[in-house]
Image (spheres, rainbow, N blue to C red):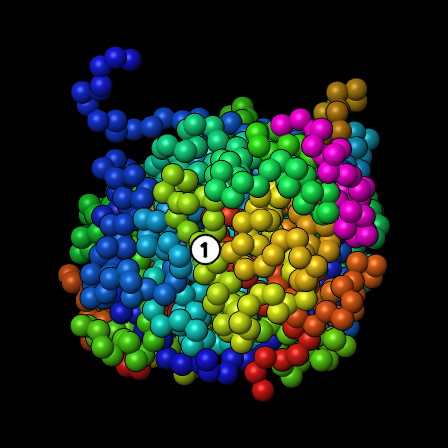
Amino acid sequence: MKRPVAVVGVGQTQHTSRRADVNIAGLVREAVDRALKDAGLDHKDIDAVVIGKAPDMLEGVMQPEQFLAGAVGAHMKPLLRVHTAGSVGASTALTAVTHVASGLYERVLTIAFEKQSEGNAMWALSPNMPFTPPLVAGAGGFFAPYCRAYIARTGCPPHIGPVVAANARANAGRNEYAHLREPMTVEDVMNSPVLWDPIRYLETCPSSDGAIALVISSAEKAKKGPRKPAWVKSGYSYAEAMWVPGRDQVSPSAGRICAKAVYDKAGITDPWNQIDTMEIYVPFAWFEPMWLENLGFCDVGEGWKIVDRGEQKFGARLPVNPSGGVLCTNPIGASGMLRLGEAALQVMGRAGAHQVEGAKTALGHAYGGGAQYFAMWIVSSEV
Amino acid sequence: MTNLRNVAVVGFAQLPVVARDEHRMSTEMLYPVVRQALAECKVERDDIDYQIAGSVDYMDGRPFGFVAALDVMGSWPARQDLHLEMDAAFCAYYAWVRMQAGECDTAIVVGHGKTSEGEPDRVLNLQLDPYYQAAIGLDPTSTAALQASAYMARTGVTDRDLASIAARNRAAGVRNADNQVRSAASADELMKTPWTVEPLRKGYLPPIGESATCMVLAAEGKARKLCDRPVWIQGVDHRSEMQTLGARDLSRSAGAQLAAQKALAMAGMKSASEADVVELYGATPVEELIVAEALGIEPNAAHPVINPSGGPLCGNPVMSTGLIRMGEIFRQLSGRAGERAVSGARRGIAHAAQGHCLQQNIVWVLGTERRWT
Amino acid sequence: MNEPPTEGIKYVDSKVYLPYDYVAGDSKVRYLQALKQKRILGSKCSKTGKVFVPPLVNSPESFAPCTELVEVADRGVVTTFCIVNIPVIGRNLEIPYVAASVALDGAAISIFALIQECKPEDVRMGMRVEAVWKPDGERQGDHEDIQYFRPTGEADAPQESYINRL
């Protein structure tokens, strides 16, 4: 990055299964208005808009940023639309960061959303790819075999997934915007039906409507703002091919390579000790221990032990997903930016009831595709 | 204007535009152009820092259709990557921004999509807001016709004027082997074609076609290693207007005008007529006139030469068509334009657009010399 | 339609209808046609010799083109799997069923396939399986020519042989 960049405003919507009270523009505006207000800015202060969302089939509209341009204040401004599958919310935020880091833009508004209640999400996610037999319904069917492989490789015991899921709910109880907030016990999870063995119903993310917007700013402008910003120390987006023989889908190399790039740039040599909290993309509970390993917080095979020891709980050693994460809120296009935005809120000291005390350095992470796309950033309370 | 980093177009490859490629899927069409672009630059995939792709799920008829492109772009080991749900010309813009941020020195920009597999009129109807405009059943030809009517009412331009522009493009298109349509047609002949949506005749509209494209960009320091005659980016800007058709003056492109103003200012040019050659995205003769007006160039003057490639009328592969305008200027300024070369061309303008009635516009100013020294 | 509506319109219901006519691509076509003859074809990387099933135009690993189609066995190893309890749109499969990654002998990557003729709880990583084809005369040259895979009863494959072909 050529010059320092900060997050100066965060705004998100009330996430829920169906926002029947607003149309798509209304949903997006709720987040945009909140983000601008948070930053103490108006549309005229914004130089460009970068929007991201997942497959447009989820809403039955194509390139909706075109009809939303007016509503998001992009009229007569540069407008770009990013789409990198599940990681899109994160790669969108990083695209906005690069705009400001380049020196060409002072303030960029970045938005990620999904109003998937408007279409048929299950259909949109498991289409009949031509010439290929449809075999499983939903993303879980694709990932479940790799969760099984993780369990086989590491001897991960069967209660770990349920522990992750119950903990995520407990966290979401402290997040006023989260979709699923009702507490559940480990036993509740273990008693829920198995969808795609080994993934259970209560270990699966919901389908949510939601949006989030961030205002990304240059250092000079950030210092004029009303709040203490979150400084973006580093951020990268990587992707790898799918059909590479021997590709590890349990701990994909793109994730490891992206994490290394992000850590190196931010001067992190010991993630476990130098990062205070993280918001990582866990759509199915088993991914939590898998990502802890992939992200270098521990050795291979040790991720589930962190969960077993409760070290990733709120208030414990290294809280994971204090917002409740994707398991409790999943508007697909927005989820990646929710992770990055929540990480920013933590180091800004603005995460309310789910604030991790003293958080100064946080990791935001998202992935997408057949575990091929990875986008992450490190944010800090210090420039 | 502070000094920016000089970045050049150093390579461009495309498949000839065809009505339907019966032998390859969309991403399979992309593989040979990526190989060709890299081979022409005599560079290995590992030596390219960044990759970015433009395509649209609905054109592919597959959600996440773009993911398969990773496998044909050499994404192993994992690469720094992005995908935009936009024409590849906008992807080139973001690659340029990354170069300005010092995040990369070389990049490949690709466009892919098969228009023949779906029904573009139905697909592109979905770009409109679902409450009012899409519900009326507007397709891109109808919205272009609305714009054409508005323009003709304001300016008095006639059917024959449109036919002349189309005829000029058709004549030029004969010399471009990559075109789908490679036969000349006179204004009289084109005026006899039936109305598709009045005032747009069939003869004024591009055919449905597909292609795949790959452009290589390189920053100063690397550019000359990859290309004997790099074509330097001297200025660029892009703008989006709001979509609502009734809320805009459809007879003008305020967005293209503002983008041109900014791009020309960056390039240190007072007027677009200082360019020798212009490739603009006008899918219809009216769009060409509107964009020419927005750029501030005379549509029928001898200089600058407009659309020596034949323009989108002769080949309009969605998702690549904007990048091809840039690719054509690269060919013109680097001595690769063969029979259609504009002699002595040293500066060119490439314009691309997407969305109904020219909603989004990008303007590039390119030249044989570096802008900042 | 003479009276204005008394209630505001809250919802707009619209159906999206988009027909698509896909090109399979030459190598896919040959792959599908070969299924009619109970043959499974893959494409071979011109640089490394690795074989991809179904065929790809290039190796995503080496970036080199795949220039030949070669036959692989119709039997192989389950590398990993899941037991599915949700019905899939467009298919009539009895729940629960097993969806597995199967690495065919000779192929460098796995295909995703249905496992039947055994209890779901008996399926395991490393289990050797073979294709069950539709009978002669019923095969059409499409992906349903292989109905499913079933255990062969052979000893499980050693972990090293499949752990890298997930």
| x then y, percent, for residue B316 | 66, 45
Question: Helix, strand or loop at disc 1?
Answer: helix
Residue drawn at the location 60% of the way across and 75% of the way down: B7
Query: Quadrant location of the C terminus of chain A?
Result: bottom left
Q: Is residue B188 left or right of residue A173?
A: right
Q: Which residue is mark 1?
A: B255
Q: Quadrant of residue A299?
A: bottom left
Q: Is residue A350 left or right of residue A221?
A: left
Q: From this view, report whether residue A207 is shown above or below residue A50.
A: above
Q: Is residue A191 left or right of residue C153?
A: left
| x then y, percent, for residue B70 | 61, 56
Of A79 and A241, nearer the camera is A79
| x then y, percent, for residue B314 | 72, 45
Residue drawn at the location 59% of the way across and 79% of the way down: B371
Residue drawn at the location 36% of the way across and 72% of the way down: A106
Q: Which residues are magenta?
A: B170-195
User: Is residue A203 visible in this depiction of the protein?
Assistant: no
For the residue carrying disc 1, how many other residues have a C-alpha within 10 Å: few (<14), some (14-19), or many (20+)?
A: many
Of B201 and A312, nearer the camera is B201
| x then y, percent, for residue C160 | 65, 59
Q: Is residue B216 left or right of residue C67?
A: left
Quick one: which residue is furthest to the top in this view? C2
- Does the magenta run of residues contain B188? yes
Of B199 and A271, nearer the camera is B199
Q: Quadrant of residue B141?
A: top right
Q: From this view, report whether residue A343 is shown above or below residue B5.
A: above
Of B109 and B299, nearer the camera is B299
User: Is residue A78 visible in this depiction of the protein?
Assistant: yes
Q: From this view, report whether residue C24 is shown above or below residue C42.
A: above
Mark 1 chain: B
